[in-house]
Image (cartoon, rainbow, N blue to C red):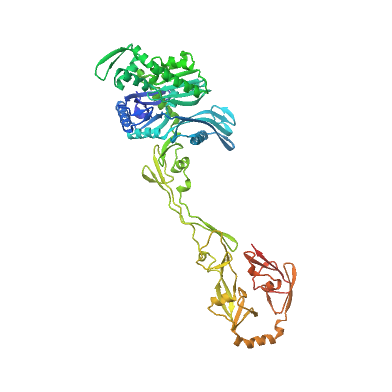
Amino acid sequence: MVDLKNVELVFGLDIGTRNVVGTVGYKDEDGFHVVGIYSKEHDSRAMLDGQIHDIGRVAKVIKVVKEELESQLGVELKETCIAAAGRVLRTIETRVSQRFSEESVVTGEDIHTLDLLGVDEAGKILKEENDTNYKFYCVGYSVVKYFLNGEIFTNLEGHKAEEISEDIIATFLPEDVVDGLYSAVEMAGLTVANLTLEPIAAINVAIPEAFRMLNIALVDIGAGTSDICITRDGSIIAYGMIPCAGDEMTEILVQHYLCTFAEAEKMKLQSSTEKEVTYTDIMMTTHTVPSEEVWELLTPQINKMAKLISDKIIELNGDKSVSACFVVGGGGKVHGFTGILSEELGVVKERVALRGEEVLGAVDFGGMDDKKDPLVVTPIGICLNYYDARNNFIMVHFNGEMMKLYDNDHLTVVDAAIQAGYDTDQLFPRRGKHITFKVNGRERFARGEAGESAIITINDSPANINSPLTPNCHIVVTPSTEGASAKYTLDMLEEYGKSTMTFMVNGSPIPVPKYVEVNGALESGSYEVKDGDVIEFRGYYTVSQLAKFMDVELDDGYAILVNNRPADENTLVYENFSVEWELATSYGAYEATYEEVPDKFKGEIHVTCNGEEVTLRGRDSYMFVDIFDAIGFNVNERKGTTVACILNGENAQYTSELNEGDELKVYWVA
């Protein structure tokens, strides 16, 4: 006997319309070993057509099954595998590709990534085609074919490739179907380890991979739904279902024999193995009837169900019948069903058969061989699917939406957000809008203020974007906020206040701040910079502006000299210029002297400016700024952001001294 505490047990639940079947087992090199099976019927119509209608009642049945198996095995069962069925099943087939930047060896992770791309693409297609109010969730997928550099390959792993592709079928059910299953399981004190689709689970047992080269249909007939899948060329090529199954037949017996649903269910099952059926009606009277009478009552419904299933199979198979059909599930055990289905499919009756004990031969039931029955094919398949899917995907809830993630052992909140299509910018603090502007011809920008980080919880506990995820966890993200837009004033500029000029006014050095010009207009330090502004720290004052800075009121009574030359209030003065102003009455004598000494201004020099010869005359000495008047260069025209002053190939100041033969260049710089 194996010590169950030393093996990894898997607990599978087949949550059906009529009953819940729990199976516990483990897998080793010899195959799958069943160590416990327990079935419990619903005590009311808590499920219809494979969908949970009363979560609380279904949860109670699941809990009974769980506790009974725990009692049998002496172990605690914490998580379970489940399968979904439903009335509104959608399948999407698509092809996806992944191209590598260079030829690479294909890894298992590459293949899983390709699968995720396929599921994602199928989801997008379904979203575009969805003409219902249902929100769909992917409950399973099958790869039809793999392609390596465009050629069909059975297994891509380990091969070198430039491009890998796959044809994939993804199966979707309404989210409320899946949510109902999860809620019932969680209410019973369990977590979901794996979710699959019922026909996927059934096919793992009923149709070995070697058989899938053939064109075969598998029909899993339960109480509320009949789930169908089709194989061909080694792959599952289609899924489907019809909302017609065993319960419709049971209802006929209820109405005819005036008995309870449970009593009619027993009659239906007994009639397939016994010659006579005994039942008790609602008047508490016991009756015995021939099984043939039950068959006759059920024949019209059997014919109807066989026709619906046959039509669906042919539709899924490209409007043609299959080569064979395997039937599993309790509903398929009704007398005569497989024969009628073979007629509808146009397939010889030997090729339409129940699959039960013969397909479970590789499964060790540990002395419970009486359990080998079509009823347990799907429950066993649910367990086996766990081994195919485990460590590959986990289920999580992101902002209320259920999703499946490929589990690489280090999944975080960010991974879930990306898979959910969440705007990852809303995970991080967002700065307010920035502004860009120019200062003295150079680009600058000011950043907006930082916002608040996103508020993240996992299972109601504080978390962050790097918090690890666990199966079935509930992630809630409240988006980050955006900070205030950038607010920047002129006096915040480094150049402001530090950038000064000095003038010699009446013989004394006077330091002054440079004026700031924004988009051609003078602005104060409190001016709020706007996006796109062009800012210039002006390298000159007018005489009037200088006087205003010094709190001197100039009027017509003042005589003004700039660099010893007559000037007025609008004359421009640059760094280190000398400025003199005196009342005219006190300046008259000096002015007369100025006129009486013509030799003071008899100097003349010849220079070259912008390639042309220029003569400067009338002064004893000259500065670079004197060239402006000589060539008619107006610095107020603002044809650029600044004036380039080049003297003998070097940058010059306005006050740089000029000499005979100097070469000058003057031009606007953008």
Q: Can residue 613 be spotted in the picture? A: yes
Q: Can residue 22 be spotted in the picture? A: no
> Quick check: 617 left or right of 34?
right
Compared with residue 362, is residue 94 higher up or lower down, i.e. above or below?
Answer: below
Compared with residue 71, is residue 467 higher up or lower down, i.e. above or below?
Answer: below
* Residue at the extreme left: 284
- The part of the image, by quadrant, that contains residue 98 is top right
> Quick check: 660 left or right of 154?
right
Quadrant assignment for the N terminus:
top left
> Quick check: 426 left or right of 280?
right
Question: How many circles with numbers are drawn on the protein?
Answer: 0
Quadrant assignment for the C terminus:
bottom right
Q: Which one is nearer the viewer's eye here, 647 or 477?
A: 477
Q: Position of residue 634 (x, y in %)?
A: 66, 70
Q: Position of residue 254 (x, y in %)?
A: 32, 20
The residue depicted at 33 percent of the width and 24 percent of the height is 39
Q: Which one is nearer the viewer's eye here, 73 or 345?
A: 345
Q: Which one is nearer the viewer's eye here, 524 or 396?
A: 524
Q: Position of residue 332 (x, y in %)?
A: 40, 19
Q: Which one is nearer the viewer's eye here, 218 or 369?
A: 218
Q: Position of residue 131 (x, y in %)?
A: 47, 34
